[in-house]
Image (spheres, rainbow, N blue to C red):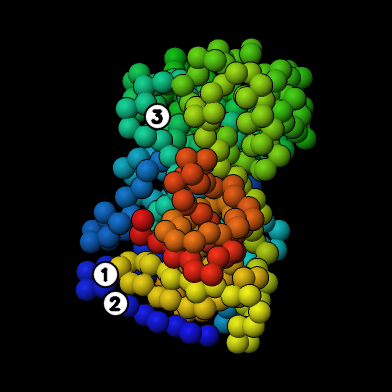
């Protein structure tokens, strides 16, 4: 494998994806199988960890000599200390540790906040947020932050199995008490009867089709926020399209179980067969390598650029987003980039395979 490095004198001192060791300030139980973990950010890192409602943090630890990363959405309102919501996944390598073992005072490696499922400033509109399970985590941050603007109205539809698995039930109730005229909260439970049959069952496209016209003026809603499992998000998005909602009003974030370790990183032999000369630019530093065309850009480049940012490796989180400057790739999956980003040349490097002889990828662009 051929590798060439070019160091720019103006390169940043840390990678965009660099981790810092943060102390845990608090661990709070938010339902029977989930906790909220708050981090203490030192003053010198305050700007780096300032977040926009809807963003997430990626955590890193080593287990049995192997590096593991998981991403968790921030559930705190704008201006508060970063706090993540974590639901335990049975036998989860990372989530079980956070829910059962982590205590205040422990130190965890945390990447600065990233993500584009975010609430912008000056959004005096009606926001409808549809979430299931742990999808409430960024929704809580967005809802609380939007309600800080007196011109905003918020409606939250939240699906769960049972009342005991409703994350942040008390905080959602507090928001309702604080903003009774501007905040509407609807719980839908799939395994526990509600007084109204309409609120009993899965929060799927069929139930949303029955619920939405009764709750909100669908075409007058300023922003729709969808966060949860793939089938719920895609079903809701398709329904909104059928109801005439413009695509630019619909924002989505997928949640999926990602507590299964990825396939082992097997060492590759010298490149044989079709290959590409790939140049990676990150933090002002360019690295050129020859890689096979049956490996993703991220997979191949990590061997010589371990500072490359990534989290889920499933095409969902968007942490590995970069811009194609020269050449072309085949992006196999994309659940994180919107059409405008793709049209502008952005790709998910964890899902992108080179298809041209030369390829330049810019993480700084």
SS category of the residue bearing label 2: strand
Q: Are marks 2 and 1 in contact (CB under 8 Å)?
A: yes
Rendered residue at 63%/53% (across/down): 333
Which residue in the protein does label 3 denote?
Answer: 146
**Image point (32%, 27%), residue name:** 122
Q: Is residue 21 above or below residue 269?
A: above
Question: Is residue 6 visible in this depiction of the protein?
Answer: yes
Q: Which residue is mark 1?
A: 11
Q: Is residue 72 left or right of residue 241?
A: left
Q: Secondary structure at mark 3?
A: helix
Residue 337 position, x and y percent, is 52, 46
Q: What residue do we see at 26% from left, 54% from top?
A: 47
Find disc 2 in the rendering and name its residue: 7
Question: Which numbered mark, 2 or 3, is in the foreground of this view?
Answer: 2
- Asked if 304 appears above or below 28 in the picture, the reply is below
Q: Quadrant of residue 49?
A: bottom left
- Give the distance between the C-alpha atoms of the residues marked 2 and 3, in whole angstroms: 43 Å
Residue 35: % across, % down: 54, 51
Estimate how packed mark 1 is, as few (under 14), some (14 to 19) or many (20 or more) residues with alpha carbons within 10 Å: few
Q: Earlier in the sequence, mark 2 or mark 3?
A: 2
What percent of the width, then of the height, locates residue 95? 60, 60
Q: Residues within 10 Å of mark 2 (few under 14, many from 20)?
A: few
- Rounded to the nearest angstrom, the CA distance separating label 2 from label 1 is 7 Å
């Amino acid at each position: 494998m051929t590798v060439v490095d070019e160091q720019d004198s103006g390169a940043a001192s840390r990678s965009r994806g660099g981790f810092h060791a943060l102390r845990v300030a608090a661990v709070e139980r938010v339902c029977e199988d989930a906790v909220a973990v708050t981090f203490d950010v030192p003053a010198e890192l305050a700007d780096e960890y300032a977040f926009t409602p809807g963003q997430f943090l990626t955590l890193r630890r080593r287990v049995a000599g192997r590096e593991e990363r998981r991403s968790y959405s921030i559930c705190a309102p704008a201006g508060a200390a970063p706090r993540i919501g974590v639901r335990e996944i049975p036998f989860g390598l990372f989530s079980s540790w956070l829910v059962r073992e982590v205590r205040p005072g422990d130190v965890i490696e945390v990447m600065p906040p990233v993500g584009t499922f975010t609430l912008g400033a000056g959004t005096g509109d009606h926001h409808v947020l549809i979430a299931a399970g742990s999808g409430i985590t960024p929704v809580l941050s967005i809802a609380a932050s939007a309600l800080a603007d007196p011109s905003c109205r918020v409606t939250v539809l939240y699906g769960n199995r049972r009342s005991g698995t409703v994350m942040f039930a008390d905080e959602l109730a507090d928001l309702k008490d604080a903003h009774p005229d501007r905040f509407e909260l609807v719980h839908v439970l799939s395994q526990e009867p509600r007084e109204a049959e309409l609120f009993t069952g899965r929060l799927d496209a069929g139930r949303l089709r029955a619920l939405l016209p009764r709750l909100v003026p669908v075409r007058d809603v300023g922003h729709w926020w969808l966060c949860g499992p793939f089938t719920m998000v895609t079903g809701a998005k398709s329904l909104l399209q059928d109801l005439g909602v413009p695509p630019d009003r619909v924002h989505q974030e997928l949640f999926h179980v990602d507590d299964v370790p990825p396939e082992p990183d097997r060492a590759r032999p010298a490149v044989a067969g079709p290959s590409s000369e790939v140049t990676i630019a990150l933090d002002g530093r360019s690295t050129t390598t020859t890689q096979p065309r049956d490996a993703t850009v991220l997979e191949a480049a990590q061997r010589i650029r371990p500072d490359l940012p990534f989290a889920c490796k499933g095409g969902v989180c968007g942490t590995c987003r970069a811009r194609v400057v020269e050449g072309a790739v085949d992006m196999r999956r994309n659940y994180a980039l919107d059409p405008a980003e793709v049209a502008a040349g952005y790709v998910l490097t964890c899902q992108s395979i080179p298809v041209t002889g030369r390829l330049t990828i810019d993480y700084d662009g």
